[in-house]
Image (cartoon, rainbow, N blue to C red):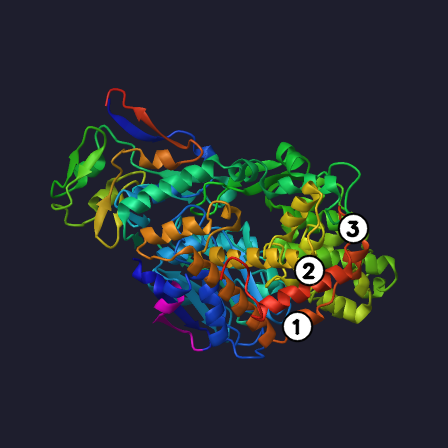
């Protein structure tokens, strides 16, 4: 068994001190990842903590399966979100999980605030605070990555996490960027690092992970590997990437377009997975330990504005969600346009999804006269105008004026200030994801612990219902969503990528743990998932969240989903049922 | 026939590191501490990768560099006799392509034995075993 996994690296930025705590309970009982992280958050984040105060801890955690099994490639971040004011949870691929685990840690916890900009360099057992004053304020997070790549050791075995100017300046939806093309995107981890004067975290490691039952482990690995490479998942996500969702969602009228005034383009969008692959795909990448390689980079070739025969080739990582938010939501009609916007948010370090929804709100608010050029500083946002959006992204990140400072707090804050609440597409303060498939999706956004489409994947149940022509009673839908979200807590504790959810049923998880010398039956695992979900909900409630009082954006109800407009009463009944489960007032069937 | 491991199509490499992890599993462990194969970017992942592994030199410089005769010629590549090795790293310095990896914990070199396990786990045909022609 890997004794190093139970080590939690504690970093106090105020005193520039680090130490290791042994926490076997978090890993042997909670599996690591989300399960471990939520316990640390309950322990270390004081009630009512200022999310951008030194007291807010940043927790990065990996789990028992990390780096040992295929697709166990993600790192979980937990913190109090400066964007929603309650639970901040974000998952990131790249090399972070691999580097962290091979450096000999199960988790890193960073709190305090440095008096000057620093970055953290963790190479195996060595932890150093390095001066980041020269890196602070740089226009591009990509440049920061390039510099650290050259100045820090560990090439091939490391992760380079960094923030952009948006994080430095406290935009509440600032992202943390890993390896240039992956992100802790949502809920504002970048702003929390910025508030701590922490520009970057470099971790490298190449240790050994002992395994209890070697033969069993090797056999199981081979089996899972073969299953993964032969799966549909592999073909689907390796060929076109998550962008393959764009065209089918558009086809069924479930792609939010122009701030969800519409749900489809008349034809296949210029930025569908197929069109991007044909015209722009330049390279595919994988997270460490994953054969799928779903990361798709477009090669964007742009002529220099003045010099003839000079071309700049930029690589832009595209996925469904950024394409939805910075393409469809903004009514962008051309592929280079959306790629330029994805590139722009990456340089300044904003969450692509939130940024797109914010710009969409601003476009509609401007059209309705709620805001004017006095607010926008002379810019006239209109659907598809990429040049204006690019400039607005820069101003949001730099927080140039009062208006852009408010935009830097999301559409909830913007609507409170300027009006337009009925078309402010947020759920519990977190901006809408790119699936308007029906009640399942909306319930996931409303009730999910992170208000993310990945929490319980209601969009999948919506599509299933559409195919079968059935409709579940609200209580039945609520229970299925809760069960799915609870099951996902097991995966995010281990930590396995949600794309591998078909590969890792609880029986397989039991086998994987068995080869590591841990016997856990399916019932125990299922219960653990439920407990982790309830612990996350308890943190939100502790910080003032009330699922009974959550507001539902009018636009999401008014604009029909493929199965028709969603009824608010239906959603409220389902939310009530979910809340009763979260409060422990009943248990799910078949698991008691 | 003897076969050697070759990097046959590096452009298809996606940096999944399954090769390095497969190599570690030879020893019944996870991680990369004793992986004989390494992947790193050529300067930014968008520019592609280099896969560094022993290419089974006909006349291996690492063998000549070893002051205690711990590296011997094998049918393909070399064999390290760990019990003789004094951990001086002369072999590491001698390899022009940096293919002698170092096991930090054990303080010994790790050199590919051309077993081909990594190639079996490479999903994209970057690695393959090929016939050695003329040694």
Q: Is residue A26 magenta?
A: yes
Q: Residue A52, relative to residue A290: is it above or below?
A: below
Residue at (82% x, 57% y) in the render: A364
User: Horizontal and vertical percent for residue A276?
Assistant: 65, 37
| Left or right of A143 on screen, residue A65 | left
Mark 2: give few (<14), some (14-19) or many (20+) Cα within 10 Å.
many
Residues in magenta?
A: A15-27
Chain letter of the residue beneath label 2 in the structure image: A
Give the spatial CA distance, label 3 vs label 1: 30 Å
Mark 1, residue position: A546
Chain letter of the residue beneath label 3 in the structure image: A
Q: Is there a contact, CB below 8 Å, between mark 2 and mark 1?
A: no
Give the spatial CA distance, label 2 vs label 1: 18 Å
Mark 3, residue position: A258
User: Could one spot residue A392 in this view of the protein?
Assistant: no
Nearest the viewer among A415 and A279 is A415
Question: Mark 3 or mark 1: which is in front?
Answer: 1
User: Could one spot residue A213 in this view of the protein?
Assistant: yes
Mark 1: give few (<14), some (14-19) or many (20+) Cα within 10 Å.
some
Give the SS element for disc 1.
Answer: loop
| Left or right of A400 on screen, residue B117 | left
Q: Which label sits on residue A431? A: 2
């Amino acid at each position: 068994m890997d004794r190093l996994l139970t080590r939690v690296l504690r970093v106090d930025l105020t005193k520039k001190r680090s130490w290791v705590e042994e926490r076997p309970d978090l890993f042997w009982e909670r599996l690591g990842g989300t399960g471990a992280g939520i316990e640390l958050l309950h322990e270390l984040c004081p009630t009512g903590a200022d999310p951008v105060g030194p007291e807010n801890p940043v927790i990065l955690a990996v789990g028992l399966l990390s780096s040992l099994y295929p697709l166990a490639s993600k790192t979980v971040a937990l913190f109090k979100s400066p964007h929603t004011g309650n639970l901040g949870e974000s998952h990131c691929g790249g090399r972070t999980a691999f580097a962290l685990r091979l450096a000999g840690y199960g988790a890193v916890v960073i709190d305090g605030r440095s008096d000057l900009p620093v970055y953290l360099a963790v190479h195996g057992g060595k932890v150093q605070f390095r001066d980041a004053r020269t890196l602070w304020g740089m226009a591009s997070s990509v440049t920061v990555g390039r510099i650290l790549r050259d100045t820090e050791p560990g090439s091939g075995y490391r992760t380079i996490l960094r923030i952009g100017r948006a994080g430095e300046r406290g935009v509440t939806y600032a992202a943390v960027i890993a390896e240039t093309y992956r992100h802790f995107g949502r809920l504002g981890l970048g702003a929390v690092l910025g508030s701590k004067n922490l520009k970057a975290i470099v971790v490298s490691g190449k240790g050994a992970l002992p395994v209890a039952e070697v033969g069993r482990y090797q056999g199981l690995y081979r089996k899972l590997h073969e299953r993964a490479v032969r799966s549909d998942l592999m073909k689907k996500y390796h060929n076109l990437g998550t962008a393959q969702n764009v065209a089918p969602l558009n086809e069924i009228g479930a792609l939010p377009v122009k701030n969800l005034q519409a749900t489809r383009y008349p034809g296949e969008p210029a930025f569908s997975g197929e069109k991007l692959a044909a015209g722009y795909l330049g390279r595919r990448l994988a997270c460490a330990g994953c054969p799928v390689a779903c990361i798709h980079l477009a090669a964007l070739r742009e002529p220099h504005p003045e010099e003839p025969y000079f071309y700049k080739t930029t690589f832009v990582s595209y996925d469904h969600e950024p394409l939805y938010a910075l393409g469809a939501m903004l009514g962008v009609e051309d592929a280079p346009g959306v790629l330029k916007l994805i590139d722009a948010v990456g340089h300044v370090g904003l969450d692509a999804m939130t940024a797109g929804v914010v710009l969409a709100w601003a476009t509609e608010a401007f059209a309705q006269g709620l805001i004017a050029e006095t607010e926008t500083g002379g810019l006239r946002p209109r659907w598809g105008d990429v040049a204006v959006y690019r400039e607005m992204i820069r101003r949001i990140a730099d927080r140039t004026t009062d208006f852009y400072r408010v935009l830097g707090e999301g559409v909830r804050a913007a609507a409170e200030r300027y009006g337009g609440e009925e078309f402010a597409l947020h759920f519990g303060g977190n901006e809408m994801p790119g699936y308007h498939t029906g009640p399942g999706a909306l319930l996931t956004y409303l009730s999910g612990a992170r208000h993310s489409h990945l929490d319980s994947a209601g969009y999948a149940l919506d599509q299933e219902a559409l195919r079968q022509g059935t409709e579940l009673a609200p209580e039945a839908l609520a229970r299925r969503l809760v069960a799915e979200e609870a099951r996902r807590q097991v995966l995010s504790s281990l930590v396995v990528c949600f794309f591998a959810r078909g590969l890792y049923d609880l029986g397989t998880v039991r086998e994987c743990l068995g080869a590591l010398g841990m016997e856990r039956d399916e019932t125990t695992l299922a219960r653990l998932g439920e407990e982790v979900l309830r612990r996350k909900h308890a943190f939100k409630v502790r910080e003032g969240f009330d699922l009974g009082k959550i507001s539902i954006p009018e636009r999401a109800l008014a604009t029909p989903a493929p199965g028709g407009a969603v009824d608010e009463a239906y959603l409220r009944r389902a939310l009530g049922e979910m809340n009763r489960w979260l409060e422990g007032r009943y248990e799910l069937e078949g698991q008691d | 026939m003897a076969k050697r491991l070759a990097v046959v199509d590096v452009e298809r490499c996606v940096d999944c590191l399954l090769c390095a992890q497969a190599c570690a599993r030879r020893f019944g462990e996870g991680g990369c501490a004793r992986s004989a194969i390494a992947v790193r970017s050529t300067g930014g992942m968008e520019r592609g990768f280099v896969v560094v592994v022993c290419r089974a030199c006909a006349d291996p410089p690492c063998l000549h560099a070893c002051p205690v005769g711990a590296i011997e010629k094998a049918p393909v590549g070399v064999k390290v006799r760990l019990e003789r090795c004094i951990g001086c790293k002369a072999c590491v310095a001698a390899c022009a392509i940096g293919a002698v990896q170092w096991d930090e914990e054990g303080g010994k070199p790790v050199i590919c034995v051309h077993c081909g396990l990594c190639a079996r786990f490479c999903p994209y045909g970057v690695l393959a075993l090929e016939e050695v022609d003329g040694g």
